[in-house]
Image (cartoon, rainbow, N blue to C red):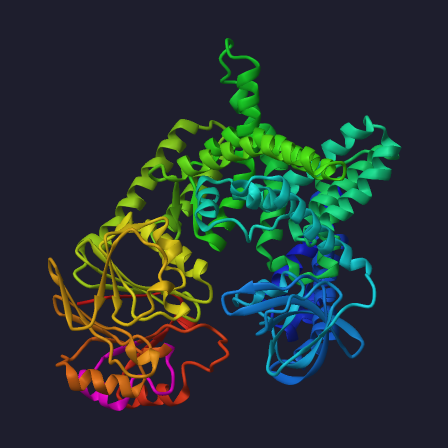
Amino acid sequence: MRVLMWFSLGYGIACALGAYLIPQGQLLTAAAVFCAGMLVMLLTGIRFRKARIAALVLFGCSAGLGWFCIYTQQYLGIAQKWNDVTRDAELTAVGYSAQTDYGWSVDAFVSIEEKPYRVRVYLEGEEEIAPGDRVYGVFRFRYTQPRAWERTSRYQGKGIFLTARQEESVEIHGSDGMSWWCYGPVLARKTGAILEEAFPEDVQSFVKALLLGDSDGLSYEADMDLRISGIRHIVAVSGLHVAILCGLVEFMTGKRRFLTALIGIPVMALFAAMAGFTPSVTRACVMAGLIILARLFDREYDSLTALAFACLVMLTVNPLIIVNAGFQLSVASVCGILLFCKPLDGWLLRRRPKAVGKIWRWICQCSAVTLSAMVLTVPLSAVYFGTVSVIGVVTNLLTLWVVNLIFNGTVAVCAASLLSAKLAGALGWMVAWPVRYVLLVAGWLSRVPLAAVYTDSVYIGAWLVFCYVLLGVCMIRKKRRNGVTFCCACLGLCIALGCSWLGPLTDGCRVTMLDVGQGQCILLQSRGKTFLLDCGGDTGKNAADRAFRKLSSQGIRRLDGVILTHGDADHIGGIGYLLSRMKTDLIIVPAGMDPEILPDLDAETVWVDRELVLRCDECTIRIFPPAFLEKDNENGLCILFEAENCGILITGDRSARGERMLIKRHVLPDVDVLVAGHHGAKTSACRDLLESVRPETVLISVGAGNPYGQPHEELLDRLLDFGCSVYRTDQEGTILYRGR
């Protein structure tokens, strides 16, 4: 009856309920309710199999909620006491420091009441920190948000419950000795160095990502090619890589069961450590270990039970891993393959042309695996990444057979490096060619029109729901009309795309403030004309991703112009990434801005030192020059966007002094919308400006939980006094304003 599977299903449901829905104070009450339901099912339906299954699921729910309550109160409750606390601390690094857009970061452990807690540390210095190093200093700690839908929940899914930001100078002391948990990151660093030496430069980042899961070195363009073409999973270490590694171990041991277990299990553990014990690789290694043990002891292996056991272990160690996107995608892909692969393979084989034979069988098997994995992962990808690859099945067919060769070749290169660097280099040169093939295919297919669709459009989201309703109806019906179902899905996609593309073409005034965290990225649109104003945020890549998805969801492949208000990273950090995928002929920047901070862009650059007016059909964009003061923020551009009966004023990062100079030098009309300067700083949107332009609505682009305390309470009170409606990206997400 698969007792463990049904119990684990309930356990997982309970963890999801605790993370997403049930308040902490009601966890024990909910556990008692599920326990009562279990007893009722046992007493009233003990003779019925479905009743026993329901009882097992309810028992799992009760146990899961009970453990979730204990974990959050007894373990996380201690960490919560350090929320927004500044204090001296000793931190022990568990990895190497890495550069971010705003400094350096490293993962470490801190001891609180004799309990270890993993913490993400943000530092100002550039000194490299290695695993085992001790960092002493004064840090400001923050507890990651307890609700799964908060942005900082990405930390909790990785077991990181505190962040620490350096407040004063720190001291770094080397480790006294190598602890067991240091071997994984140290070996990963050494392996990465071997790969960099042995492989040509153009493929180094790919093979490092393939073997180690370290995709930081991938160029933005390559990463987008892989994502859009639907094979991003091959550079995120997962079950695919573990399966290839298991096959390699079995080949080397001649499938001798004892020798395979003796070598395979430690290799799996070491591989998981090198990959950082990510949820997907941990799940896969546990399941692979169970396969090896089942063969060793002549036991039956059940895939669903093994998956349930792996999930149960991981959820017990950290119940909040349920909110991790990697965990959800990994479990969903395996469930999809186990549930749908055989039926899909059989359905495809029944259409096999007799003349094709083995080739068609191979195509059917690969297609069935890919499609079955996508059945349950597509909704998750749509929610987390906003992208659904339409061409992914084709890309997987063309490339996955090569990935096995590349992975084994990369392992061979690492082994050869122990004997001779020249031998490793020769093997690396050979393996580089299939890597180039994969990148070439991904690059070509990612640029095919409609290679992917984007859920930034609500119509595409509705189309996905429609497709899954069709799938459900098709599975329920005895007489399945797959052709009709496919045609309905295609027709629905055409309608969704038409609706998505129609809005920007027909709206006279359309302003979209993208939710990019602590930064700014705004789209100004009128009758099919699109201008991008700034592109920066918490990270440049994140801002570029948001802008690319939003533009692509509207069918826009080229911008009419790009306006950069000033040179701060939170305003221009993503522009180079974005324009590597989406071109423009015109870039407008303030005079006096350092040209070296601009990426190399193939477009005409206009340096604004006096008022500039752009007229495009029914819209007018007035660009006001810098104030030419000593402060950089005052030397940014201000923009007045006017279309039909709509006016929007954007002041960049100017403070009250720069705003008063704007009013003094230029005649400003009343506007419908004011974008508050400097992300809602205390000195932005001063009274003089508000009295001059009399905005009805004020938009603020600001990151949730930012360390600057923005938007400032004094500003919000001032806007309230003027009767302005206020909308903020940290509360509303992406904001769309359509003029009357």
Residue 48: tell me if it is visible: no
Q: Nearer the viewer, residue 11 or 376?
A: 376
Tell whether 270 sits left or right of 205.
Answer: right
Residue 607, percent from left and from top: 23, 66
Tell whether 63 sits left or right of 697.
Answer: right
Residue 542, percent from left and from top: 45, 59
- The residue that appears at 60% across and 36% down in the rendered structure is 337
Find the magenta span and give its range: 679-698
> Quick one: quadrant of the C terminus?
bottom left
Residue 708: tell me if it is visible: yes
- The residue that appears at 81% across and 27% down in the rendered structure is 255
Residue 615, percent from left and from top: 12, 62
> Quick one: quadrant of the N terminus?
top right
Q: Residue furthest top?
A: 355
Q: Is residue 446 magenta?
A: no
- The residue that appears at 62% across and 30% down in the rendered structure is 405
Q: In the image, is residue 109 above or below residue 492?
A: below
Q: Nearer the viewer, residue 223 or 58?
A: 223
- The residue that appears at 44% across and 68% down in the rendered structure is 517
The mark total stands at 0
Residue 130, percent from left and from top: 70, 63
Tell whether 447 sits left or right of 31.
Answer: left
